[in-house]
Amino acid sequence: MTDHYNDNFDNSPKDQDNNTIDLRFAVKLFFVSIFYMIMVSLVTYVIVTFLHDLVTPLLKSLVNLLSYSVSLLLIIKYATNARPQQQPRSVTRGTGWKMIWLTPVLIISTLALCVWVEGLSLLVPMPEAVEEFFNDLVKPDVFSILTIVVAAPILEEVLCRGILLKGLLKNYSPDNAIGISAIFFGAIHLNPWQAIPALAIGIFLGWVFYKTRSVLPGIIIHATVNGTSVLMTFYLPDADHIFAEFSIPVYILWFAISAVIFAAGCLLIQKKGPSNLSQHPH
């Protein structure tokens, strides 16, 4: 997947100090993330319960947006305080006008990947009761959509790629660093039934960060994945039934076309590479 270790991600001994981001730090960051998520959720639950009669469904969605954002910001703050040299200086610097052609490539490639991700999700089907529980957490309102399509892509990419993967690439080979960050990305979603799809998406997000040196492409990919999920869940609920009626040859053709489109997108990103998109990780 990845080519030779790039000099921009130097793994010299000078990085082996308290600012090192390695596997041990990734594990610690995972448990810290769970702690902050639980604490913020408990505070939110107490507030919502206390003001139960005043909380409308729309207001509850706003509270969920604020709760999610606060928990992720606290995690990001912890990571940057613990490893100050790993602070992302900019989420966009280094891509510039290249994003004009890169954006449609990313979106189309991601949509093609979503076809395969949906197939992977069938390997470990989510129990109906659990699926209903997750669906009840969000509603088709503006604040829920902002949480899923805007807040999550920005905050999670800054954390998982802009801080964690950026640091891991200084101490591990690209394949290992991307793998660790992808596992972390899947784990913090706390949804074992989506572990395989999340891992696949996390690997792609990590590879794109490695090639572009920016979290902005990852934000676009992440928003596309989440936006597709919102569209299918809230506005095209019968789509699964339509796909279920496809014959096996149609399925094979559908997956083959998606694979070709995804591979073509990856080749475009590979050819333009880090040397053309950005000279420095950030």
Image (cartoon, rainbow, N blue to C red):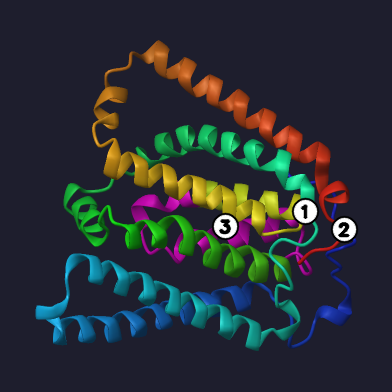
* Residue 138 position in % (x across, y down): 27, 59
Q: Is 195 included in the stretch rendered in magenta?
A: yes
Mark 3 and mark 2 in contact? Answer it, CB < 8 Å: no
Name the residue type under label 1: Thr
Q: Is residue 268 above or below residue 191?
A: above
Residue 223: assigned label = none
Residue 182: assigned label = 3
Q: Distance between the residues labelled 1 and 3?
A: 23 Å
Mark 1 and mark 2 in contact? Answer it, CB < 8 Å: no
Q: Which residue is drawn at 64% across and 88% down?
A: 81
Q: Name the residue under label 1.
A: 95
Q: Earlier in the sequence, mark 1 or mark 2?
A: 1
| Left or right of residue 123, residue 48 in this image | left
| Left or right of residue 256, residue 51 in this image | left
Q: Earlier in the sequence, mark 3 or mark 2?
A: 3
Location of the N terminus by quadrant is top right
Q: In this view, does 73 lie above or below 196?
A: below
Name the residue type under label 2: Gln
Q: Which residue is drawn at 72% across and 38% down?
A: 101
* Residue 77 position in % (x across, y down): 57, 83
Q: Earlier in the sequence, mark 1 or mark 3?
A: 1
Q: How far apart are marks 1 and 2 (CA)?
A: 9 Å
Q: Name the residue under label 2.
A: 279
Range covered by the magenta-colored residues: 169-198
